[in-house]
Amino acid sequence: LIATIAGITTMIPQGLALMTTISFAVAALTLGSKKVLIQEQPAVEILARVDTVCLDKTGTLTEGVMQFSSAKALAATDHGWKLVLGHIGADPNANTTAVALREPFPQSPPLPQTDAIAFASERRWSAFAFGNIQDTQASAGAWVLGAPEALIDALSVDTDARAELHESAKRLSSSGKRTMLLAHSTTPSRSASTTHPWFGEHAVLPGDLYPAAVVTFEEKVRDDARETLEYFQQQGVELKVISGDSPHTVAAVARQIGWEHPDSGYDACNLPDNIEDMAAVMQEHSVFGRVSPDQKEQMVKALQHRERVVAMTGDGVNDALAVKTADLGIAMGDAAAATKAVSRLVLLDSKFSRLPSVLAEGRKVIANMERLAHLFLAKTAYAFLFVLLFSLLAWQYPALPRQMSTADFLFIGLASFILALMPNPRRYVAGFLSRALKFALPTGVMLVAALWGINWYARVWAGDFSGVLPYASEDPGAPLVMEQLQTATFITLTLAGLWLLNVISRPLNWQKIGMLIALHIIFILVLVVPLSQWYHHFILPPTPIIIAAVGIAALGALGIEVIHRIHDARMGLAPDDPRPKG
């Protein structure tokens, strides 16, 4: 019964579940100390698998604070466009772009607004209607402020003027500035709505629309953006910048942060609807502009269609759909409530530079868990084969539960806790279970071969082939007793197991070397301290058996080393290199 318990309990990798839980919990605490809130525990595991990061320009690459740059009149006569810009900036519901107009264009005097159409990403313009304006130079009618590409083709000007405006807007956008066009019409806009002609999703641009001024804004690029992008590129993570701004503006910002060879920007207006075609475009280009909220979501799905593991960052309501759809949604701390609610991670201080530590922590947890899985599954493999082999040979199981528990503690239990919390830069590679089994099974066979070897040698030396040796309490004068065989088995198993731990711990550093030395010292103390001998029922065997136990353990260690090197070669790893080449 005791031997059965010893064999069965050894088969169970009970520590693996515990260490996984502890690692995930520690990762959550570590990221929390770095101002990163984990809202869903599986996010830690997904962190390691992310191979594509989609970035929203505003608030991620830039600080999200818009600053006024310049304004240039386009009309021959001044229709009071400065007063209109001042009115737009003074609107209590103004967005970040409109707020930047308050300082250069103070509102004085107030204009009699009759209707308004709020800015929408789908339209890319907002509009205001004014009645008769007395004692001001601002003309009555409709004033529209929006993206040049959304307004120029609707202007009542000739073809040459439109081409010139397009070229001018492209030139300004290519300098990294957000460019807006202010246009005026004396014909108010009308929509399908009968109650609120200026509101509703069917609002249309007014007729007789003429350009009044072109306004440019600047965003400050985050100081840490360059370093963060370089880290992702070094780690083999592909980056996609997705923004509602002009693709020329987005590409210019990418160049400002030192992104090597960014393309000129892809206009999302040309994105195909078919997901396969969209995935092909996503693979070819990295910078996208004029992207609508629905398109952001579809772009994430297109990447996932190509089996990419996608992280999406965002801060606005327009990013909520894409953040929710992504494998890992990341919201800024100052993001809209809806975006934070659907995200799995929140960067509490809204610092883009937190992302490298987030990725590194996820990779550390998963890489360490795979390392420990190799160790625990190798234990399960040898324990099962050990019991099976000795049952077929009709040999008594040469270990007690307390002896096997101590052996597990020496080369698995204590070490697994330390290794689970150590840094590990290895990149995630798919096929975790397959790799673990390909290493654990042959390693288990090698350990069992070593255990069989010492037991076979001990029986040959003792001249006993019955499979059952006497206990010391029954026959003290016997040349070899069961406690001595159990001690020899413990020596062989623990020494070979410590070499397995050595292999699993690579690449070695001073911390890991110190851990291995300490475990070997504890191993010797377990064997020689009288109290430990009494507790474990250890009796040191004769010197030839001890030498044989150490020698067979060395042969087992050699076999484990060969298995390790073959395993790494199949994975595409150089010896002791933690980073897969593939």
Image (spheres, rainbow, N blue to C red):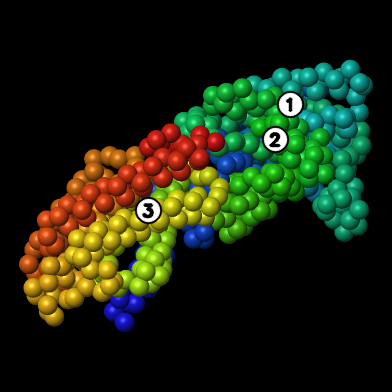
Instruction: Point out the image quarter for the C terminus.
Output: top right
Give the mark, 1 or 2, whose residue is nearer the N terminus: 1
Taking 398 as reference, is 207 above or below it? above
Looking at the rendered structure, the secondary structure element under dot 2 is: helix
x, y percent for residue 569: 47, 37
Kindly check if marks 1 and 2 are in contact, taking CB atoms under 8 A apart as contact: no
Image side of residue 71 versus residue 239, left or right:
right
x, y percent for residue 50: 56, 45
- C-alpha gap between disc 1 and disc 2: 35 Å
Question: What residue appears at the point 67 percent right and 38 percent down from the top-left corner?
Answer: 243
Tell me the amino acid under the disc marked 3: Met
Kindly check if marks 1 and 3 are in contact, taking CB atoms under 8 A apart as contact: no
Tell me the amino acid under the disc marked 1: Val
Most foreground residue, 551 or 369: 551
x, y percent for residue 340: 56, 55
Taking 135 as reference, is 471 above or below it? below
Image mark for residue 446: 3
> Which image quadrant for residue 167?
top right
Is residue 14 in view from this perspective? no
Looking at the rendered structure, the secondary structure element under dot 3 is: helix
Q: Find disc 1 in the rendering and name its residue.
A: 214
